[in-house]
Amino acid sequence: MELILANTGSYPRIGDTPAQQRLRRAYQEREQGQLGAEAFTRLQDEVTEEVVREQLAAGVELPTDGQIRWADGLSYLAANLNGVSVNGLLRFFDTNTYFRQPVVTGRLTRRGPLFSHDYRQAARAAGRPLKAVLTGPYTMARGSILEGGYRSIHALALAYAAVLAQEVAELAEAGAPVIQVDEPAILRHRADLAILGEALVVLARGKGAARLSLATYFADAVPIYDDLQELTIDLLHLDFTYSPALGRAIGERGASKALSL
Protein backbone atom coordinates (compact mmCIF):
# COMPACT_ATOMS: atom_id res chain seq x y z
CA MET A 1 0.00 0.00 0.00
CA GLU A 2 1.35 3.40 -1.01
CA LEU A 3 0.45 6.50 1.00
CA ILE A 4 0.80 9.99 -0.49
CA LEU A 5 0.44 13.14 1.58
CA ALA A 6 -1.83 15.54 -0.31
CA ASN A 7 -3.68 18.79 0.24
CA THR A 8 -7.44 18.46 -0.16
CA GLY A 9 -7.95 21.91 -1.64
CA SER A 10 -7.68 25.31 -0.01
CA TYR A 11 -4.91 26.59 2.23
CA PRO A 12 -5.02 29.34 4.90
CA ARG A 13 -4.45 32.63 3.11
CA ILE A 14 -4.52 34.85 6.21
CA GLY A 15 -1.95 34.43 9.00
CA ASP A 16 -1.16 36.12 12.30
CA THR A 17 1.55 38.53 11.20
CA PRO A 18 0.94 41.81 9.34
CA ALA A 19 2.76 40.39 6.30
CA GLN A 20 0.44 37.37 6.28
CA GLN A 21 -2.60 39.66 6.41
CA ARG A 22 -1.69 41.77 3.40
CA LEU A 23 -4.01 39.84 1.10
CA ARG A 24 -7.01 40.68 3.28
CA ARG A 25 -6.02 44.34 3.24
CA ALA A 26 -5.60 44.17 -0.52
CA TYR A 27 -9.14 42.83 -0.98
CA GLN A 28 -10.48 45.75 1.04
CA GLU A 29 -8.40 48.27 -0.89
CA ARG A 30 -9.49 46.70 -4.17
CA GLU A 31 -13.18 46.98 -3.23
CA GLN A 32 -12.66 50.62 -2.27
CA GLY A 33 -10.93 51.42 -5.55
CA GLN A 34 -7.58 52.07 -3.86
CA LEU A 35 -5.69 49.20 -5.51
CA GLY A 36 -5.38 48.58 -9.24
CA ALA A 37 -5.99 45.25 -10.95
CA GLU A 38 -2.33 44.71 -11.89
CA ALA A 39 -1.05 45.29 -8.35
CA PHE A 40 -3.79 43.07 -6.94
CA THR A 41 -2.88 40.24 -9.33
CA ARG A 42 0.81 40.53 -8.41
CA LEU A 43 -0.05 40.18 -4.73
CA GLN A 44 -2.21 37.13 -5.41
CA ASP A 45 0.71 35.62 -7.33
CA GLU A 46 3.05 36.27 -4.40
CA VAL A 47 0.73 34.73 -1.82
CA THR A 48 0.06 31.73 -4.05
CA GLU A 49 3.80 31.13 -4.39
CA GLU A 50 4.24 31.40 -0.62
CA VAL A 51 1.53 28.88 0.25
CA VAL A 52 2.73 26.42 -2.39
CA ARG A 53 6.29 26.60 -1.06
CA GLU A 54 5.03 26.20 2.50
CA GLN A 55 3.18 23.02 1.54
CA LEU A 56 6.29 21.62 -0.13
CA ALA A 57 8.46 22.53 2.85
CA ALA A 58 6.03 20.66 5.11
CA GLY A 59 6.44 17.52 3.02
CA VAL A 60 3.15 17.64 1.13
CA GLU A 61 3.74 15.47 -1.94
CA LEU A 62 0.64 16.56 -3.84
CA PRO A 63 0.04 20.24 -3.06
CA THR A 64 -2.58 22.54 -4.56
CA ASP A 65 -2.45 26.22 -5.46
CA GLY A 66 -4.18 26.87 -2.12
CA GLN A 67 -7.18 28.41 -3.92
CA ILE A 68 -5.87 31.85 -2.98
CA ARG A 69 -7.88 33.54 -5.73
CA TRP A 70 -11.13 31.75 -4.90
CA ALA A 71 -13.65 33.93 -3.08
CA ASP A 72 -15.72 30.74 -2.97
CA GLY A 73 -16.02 27.50 -4.88
CA LEU A 74 -18.89 28.51 -7.14
CA SER A 75 -18.62 32.19 -8.06
CA TYR A 76 -14.90 31.83 -8.89
CA LEU A 77 -15.84 29.54 -11.78
CA ALA A 78 -19.18 31.12 -12.67
CA ALA A 79 -17.66 34.60 -13.03
CA ASN A 80 -16.02 33.59 -16.33
CA LEU A 81 -19.10 32.00 -17.87
CA ASN A 82 -21.61 33.52 -20.25
CA GLY A 83 -25.23 32.90 -19.32
CA VAL A 84 -24.55 33.39 -15.59
CA SER A 85 -24.63 36.31 -13.19
CA VAL A 86 -23.61 36.23 -9.54
CA ASN A 87 -26.18 36.91 -6.82
CA GLY A 88 -25.97 37.50 -3.07
CA LEU A 89 -24.44 35.38 -0.33
CA LEU A 90 -25.73 31.98 0.75
CA ARG A 91 -24.37 29.69 3.46
CA PHE A 92 -22.20 26.89 2.05
CA PHE A 93 -23.84 23.77 3.48
CA ASP A 94 -23.59 23.71 7.30
CA THR A 95 -20.36 25.68 7.51
CA ASN A 96 -19.47 29.19 8.61
CA THR A 97 -18.52 30.14 5.06
CA TYR A 98 -20.68 31.64 2.33
CA PHE A 99 -20.75 31.68 -1.46
CA ARG A 100 -22.17 34.06 -4.01
CA GLN A 101 -24.91 32.14 -5.75
CA PRO A 102 -24.74 31.85 -9.55
CA VAL A 103 -27.93 32.78 -11.41
CA VAL A 104 -28.29 30.96 -14.73
CA THR A 105 -30.28 32.89 -17.32
CA GLY A 106 -29.01 31.44 -20.60
CA ARG A 107 -26.79 28.88 -22.25
CA LEU A 108 -23.43 28.37 -20.57
CA THR A 109 -20.22 29.07 -22.48
CA ARG A 110 -16.76 30.00 -21.30
CA ARG A 111 -15.44 33.51 -21.75
CA GLY A 112 -11.95 32.10 -21.27
CA PRO A 113 -10.06 29.82 -18.89
CA LEU A 114 -11.82 29.37 -15.55
CA PHE A 115 -8.90 28.02 -13.52
CA SER A 116 -6.26 26.64 -15.89
CA HIS A 117 -4.48 30.01 -16.25
CA ASP A 118 -4.15 30.37 -12.47
CA TYR A 119 -3.09 26.72 -12.23
CA ARG A 120 -0.24 27.26 -14.67
CA GLN A 121 0.99 30.27 -12.69
CA ALA A 122 0.98 28.27 -9.45
CA ALA A 123 2.73 25.30 -11.06
CA ARG A 124 5.47 27.59 -12.38
CA ALA A 125 5.94 28.99 -8.88
CA ALA A 126 6.17 25.47 -7.47
CA GLY A 127 8.52 24.24 -10.17
CA ARG A 128 6.41 21.09 -10.39
CA PRO A 129 2.88 19.96 -11.25
CA LEU A 130 0.17 20.46 -8.61
CA LYS A 131 -3.15 18.82 -7.92
CA ALA A 132 -5.95 20.78 -9.59
CA VAL A 133 -9.29 21.24 -7.83
CA LEU A 134 -12.62 22.17 -9.42
CA THR A 135 -16.11 22.43 -8.00
CA GLY A 136 -18.03 19.72 -9.82
CA PRO A 137 -20.89 20.19 -12.28
CA TYR A 138 -23.59 18.67 -10.09
CA THR A 139 -22.72 20.84 -7.08
CA MET A 140 -22.49 23.87 -9.38
CA ALA A 141 -25.99 23.09 -10.66
CA ARG A 142 -27.45 22.51 -7.19
CA GLY A 143 -25.89 25.73 -5.94
CA SER A 144 -27.26 27.83 -8.79
CA ILE A 145 -30.56 29.63 -9.23
CA LEU A 146 -32.02 28.40 -12.51
CA GLU A 147 -33.97 31.17 -14.27
CA GLY A 148 -33.44 30.30 -17.92
CA GLY A 149 -31.49 28.39 -20.54
CA TYR A 150 -32.27 24.94 -19.12
CA ARG A 151 -35.36 23.19 -17.83
CA SER A 152 -33.96 21.02 -15.05
CA ILE A 153 -31.10 20.43 -12.65
CA HIS A 154 -30.21 17.43 -14.81
CA ALA A 155 -29.80 19.55 -17.94
CA LEU A 156 -27.95 22.27 -16.04
CA ALA A 157 -25.52 19.78 -14.50
CA LEU A 158 -24.65 18.44 -17.96
CA ALA A 159 -24.21 21.99 -19.25
CA TYR A 160 -21.79 22.75 -16.43
CA ALA A 161 -20.05 19.46 -17.23
CA ALA A 162 -19.56 20.54 -20.84
CA VAL A 163 -17.80 23.79 -19.91
CA LEU A 164 -15.81 22.16 -17.10
CA ALA A 165 -14.69 19.41 -19.49
CA GLN A 166 -12.84 22.08 -21.47
CA GLU A 167 -11.15 23.12 -18.25
CA VAL A 168 -10.23 19.51 -17.40
CA ALA A 169 -8.60 19.11 -20.81
CA GLU A 170 -6.55 22.29 -20.35
CA LEU A 171 -5.48 21.26 -16.85
CA ALA A 172 -4.42 17.85 -18.12
CA GLU A 173 -2.46 19.53 -20.92
CA ALA A 174 -0.80 21.74 -18.29
CA GLY A 175 0.47 18.62 -16.54
CA ALA A 176 -1.91 18.24 -13.60
CA PRO A 177 -1.40 14.66 -12.36
CA VAL A 178 -4.70 14.66 -10.44
CA ILE A 179 -7.81 16.71 -11.15
CA GLN A 180 -10.12 16.68 -8.15
CA VAL A 181 -13.83 17.31 -8.69
CA ASP A 182 -15.60 18.44 -5.52
CA GLU A 183 -19.17 17.14 -5.29
CA PRO A 184 -20.46 17.58 -1.73
CA ALA A 185 -24.04 18.10 -2.96
CA ILE A 186 -24.44 14.51 -4.14
CA LEU A 187 -24.47 13.19 -0.57
CA ARG A 188 -27.49 15.41 0.15
CA HIS A 189 -29.27 14.28 -3.04
CA ARG A 190 -28.34 10.62 -3.38
CA ALA A 191 -31.22 9.92 -5.77
CA ASP A 192 -29.39 12.05 -8.36
CA LEU A 193 -26.35 9.78 -8.51
CA ALA A 194 -27.12 8.87 -12.12
CA ILE A 195 -26.98 12.57 -13.06
CA LEU A 196 -23.57 12.87 -11.45
CA GLY A 197 -22.49 9.73 -13.27
CA GLU A 198 -23.41 11.23 -16.65
CA ALA A 199 -21.59 14.46 -15.83
CA LEU A 200 -18.42 12.62 -14.79
CA VAL A 201 -18.37 10.71 -18.08
CA VAL A 202 -18.29 14.08 -19.86
CA LEU A 203 -15.41 15.30 -17.68
CA ALA A 204 -13.44 12.07 -18.07
CA ARG A 205 -13.29 12.40 -21.85
CA GLY A 206 -10.81 15.25 -21.58
CA LYS A 207 -8.62 14.08 -18.71
CA GLY A 208 -5.88 12.57 -20.83
CA ALA A 209 -3.16 11.09 -18.61
CA ALA A 210 -4.46 12.87 -15.51
CA ARG A 211 -6.31 10.95 -12.82
CA LEU A 212 -9.84 12.15 -12.11
CA SER A 213 -10.69 12.28 -8.41
CA LEU A 214 -14.19 12.65 -6.95
CA ALA A 215 -14.35 14.37 -3.55
CA THR A 216 -17.41 14.01 -1.31
CA TYR A 217 -17.94 15.58 2.11
CA PHE A 218 -20.45 17.32 4.43
CA ALA A 219 -22.65 14.19 4.74
CA ASP A 220 -22.48 10.42 5.22
CA ALA A 221 -21.05 8.58 2.20
CA VAL A 222 -21.73 5.06 3.49
CA PRO A 223 -25.24 4.68 1.95
CA ILE A 224 -23.83 5.12 -1.57
CA TYR A 225 -20.27 3.91 -0.98
CA ASP A 226 -20.62 0.96 -3.38
CA ASP A 227 -22.29 3.13 -6.03
CA LEU A 228 -19.49 5.69 -5.87
CA GLN A 229 -17.03 2.92 -6.74
CA GLU A 230 -18.84 2.41 -10.06
CA LEU A 231 -18.44 5.98 -11.32
CA THR A 232 -16.05 7.00 -14.12
CA ILE A 233 -13.27 8.17 -11.81
CA ASP A 234 -9.78 7.06 -10.84
CA LEU A 235 -9.74 8.16 -7.20
CA LEU A 236 -12.43 8.56 -4.56
CA HIS A 237 -12.00 11.13 -1.78
CA LEU A 238 -14.03 10.44 1.38
CA ASP A 239 -14.59 12.46 4.56
CA PHE A 240 -14.75 10.49 7.81
CA THR A 241 -16.11 13.47 9.79
CA TYR A 242 -19.71 12.78 8.79
CA SER A 243 -19.37 9.01 8.31
CA PRO A 244 -18.53 7.21 11.58
CA ALA A 245 -19.15 3.82 9.94
CA LEU A 246 -17.06 4.56 6.87
CA GLY A 247 -13.90 2.86 8.12
CA ARG A 248 -15.81 -0.35 8.76
CA ALA A 249 -17.49 -0.16 5.36
CA ILE A 250 -14.14 0.19 3.59
CA GLY A 251 -12.66 -2.68 5.59
CA GLU A 252 -15.58 -4.99 4.87
CA ARG A 253 -16.29 -4.09 1.25
CA GLY A 254 -12.87 -3.09 -0.01
CA ALA A 255 -12.38 -0.53 -2.76
CA SER A 256 -12.08 -0.79 -6.52
CA LYS A 257 -10.78 2.80 -6.71
CA ALA A 258 -7.74 4.38 -5.12
CA LEU A 259 -8.91 6.17 -1.98
CA SER A 260 -8.14 9.63 -0.63
CA LEU A 261 -9.05 9.90 3.02
Image (cartoon, grey):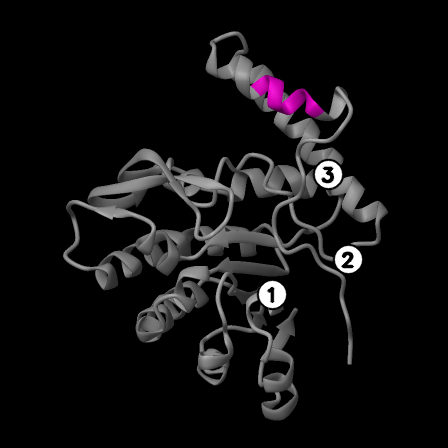
Type of amino acid at the residue the image marks with label 3: Val
Residue at left offset 35%, top offset 66% = 199
Tell me: residue 257, above or below residue 261: below
Describe the element under mark 3 as helix, strand or loop: helix
- Which class describes the residues within 10 Å of circle 2: few (<14), some (14-19), or many (20+)? some
Mark 3 crowdedness (10 Å alpha carbons): few <14, some 14-19, many ≥20 = many
Few, some or many C-alpha atoms within 10 Å of disc 1 (few <14, some 14-19, many ≥20)?
few
Question: Which label number is shown at residue 241?
Answer: 1
Residue 149 forms part of the magenta stretch: no
Nearest to N terminus: mark 2 or mark 1: 2
Question: What secondary structure is the stretch in magenta mostly built from?
Answer: helix
- What label does residue 61 carry, if any? 2
Query: Which mark is nearer the camera, 2 or 1?
Result: 1
* Residue picked out by circle 3: 51
As measured in the structure, the alpha-carbon distance from the residue carrying label 2 to the one carrying label 1 is: 23 Å
Q: Write the residue at 30% across / 48% down.
A: 144
Residue under the point 60% across and 75% down = 244
Where does the C terminus fall, quadrant-wise? bottom right
**96 or 31: nearer the eye?**
96
Q: Whole-Å distance between the Cαs marked 3 and 1? A: 25 Å
